[in-house]
Image (cartoon, coloured by chain):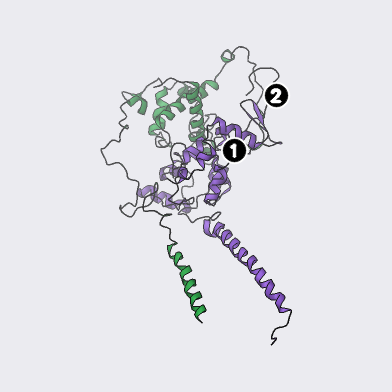
Amino acid sequence: MRNLRKFAFLGVLALVPLAGCRQDMHDQPRFKPLAESDFYPDMRSARQPVEGTVARGQLHEDTYFYTGLVNGKPGDYMPFPVTKDVLERGRQRFDIYCTPCHSRMGDGNGVVVQRGFQRPPSYHTDRLRNAPLGYFFDVMTAGFGAMPSYAEQVPARDRWAIVAYIRALQLSQNATSADVPPGQKVPSPAPEFRGDPGSGATLPQLQPVQNESGGEAK
Amino acid sequence: MQIFHRATNTIAKATIFGSIFLLAFILWACIQFQRSPYVTYAHVARPQPVPFSHEHHVGAIGLDCRYCHTSVEKSSFAGIPPTQTCMNCHSQIWLGAPMLEPVRASYRSGKSLVWNRVNDLPDFVYFNHSIHINKGIGCNTCHGPVDRMPLMYNEASLQMEWCLDCHRDPAKYIRPRSQVFNMRYEPPSGSKPMELDGKLYTDQLVLGKDLVKQYNLRTVADITSCSTCHR
């Protein structure tokens, strides 16, 4: 009998640590990004800046860099030099944010357009070929027609990189044999792809090419 | 006085011996239980205000992850898109769909959509998306085949043993930076070799070792130290 009591006591004692099984460390009293808060009427823990205030470093003094406009008219120069890195960045960002509608070619026949969105104009028209650089930046920043502003999704420097890449796209679609560097053959062999076509903005994998001519095979 | 038959001695011995196995089994069952989806919610789709399909938007439309999760490359938080991002397309597509009414209502009223968090790490874990992205860890290495998920679920258990599986040997999973957002990336193999910087790879571990060096990953001792994740 005494033994039984002892066992029962030990059994209850063994259950005591269970009382410590709480999730306090798991769910700490702090907000993760964009978490809900019942403190504010709009339930947002992430607050908008107070109206009329400017966050540090966001005064945007360089108006051309942030609007593409000079005295209200689109300017026609890049605010920073265009290097190969800038163009690569521009292509990458173009492929992420612009191709859904404008397509990789820039002809305005992207997949979202094929699903019923209003077709944007092709970049390869005389009007857009002659449009100043700042025009493209302004459209990305402020939106145009059915196209919303992309200023929230794409930072200003990336928008400029996309502008540079759009110009490169336009040139590529309008190239002549004079643009081919000496020593390169035209047409170059079509690239061979393997496997799945990749997804989203990722180019499909190129088939490794055995390179005998010593020319550019990429 | 002999109450029980002699044979019962064997049963008694077997019971004592068997109890070891029974205890081992109970222990094993407990461990498996706390690894199970019942506890980790792995592969359990959560209810959402709108049944958003990654399968459709990523797999069929081909949107890049970063179209919506804009801060994933430069912030700890990948970012949940504002309603405006949905309306970029849905101002013209699927205009009358009742399924999308919460999105339109949110756009009209300016009230946020309240999504249920799917990949929810414990608050005592410091996690940063950008470092993983920039060191060549693919989205689907952790998030699974998102382009085949009609409803979002977490692929991983998000338990520490799962984190450590990679932190102990990142070469098993690391991939070229250009492939991080590729949902159909396949590690190099004998039948599908990969060319990178003029070198032909047929084995993930060989590629992994090179990339770990090239991307300047911290040593295994560094990234398995407690304070890397528990700060």
Q: Name the residue under label 1.
A: B171
Q: Mark 2 points at which residue?
A: A210
**Considering the image in quadrants, where does the C terminus of chain A appear?**
top right
Write the residue at 45% across / 20% down: A82
- Report whether residue B185 is seen: yes
Q: Where is residue B27 in the image (x, y as percent from the top left)?
A: 58, 62
Q: Examine the image and state in which quarter residue B14 appears.
A: bottom right
Q: Which amino acid does label 2 sit on?
A: Gln
Q: Where residue B58 is drawn, which disc sits there?
A: none
Task: Say if B12 sits above or below A106 in the image.
Answer: below
Host chain of mark 1 = B
Q: Examine the image and state in which quarter residue B136 appears.
A: top right
Q: Where is residue A191 in the image (x, y as percent from the top left)?
A: 65, 27
Chain (green): A
Q: Which amino acid does label 1 sit on?
A: Ala
- Report whether residue B140 is seen: no
Q: Position of residue A58 (x, y in %)?
A: 32, 32
Whole-angstrom CA distance, mark 2 to mark 1, is: 27 Å
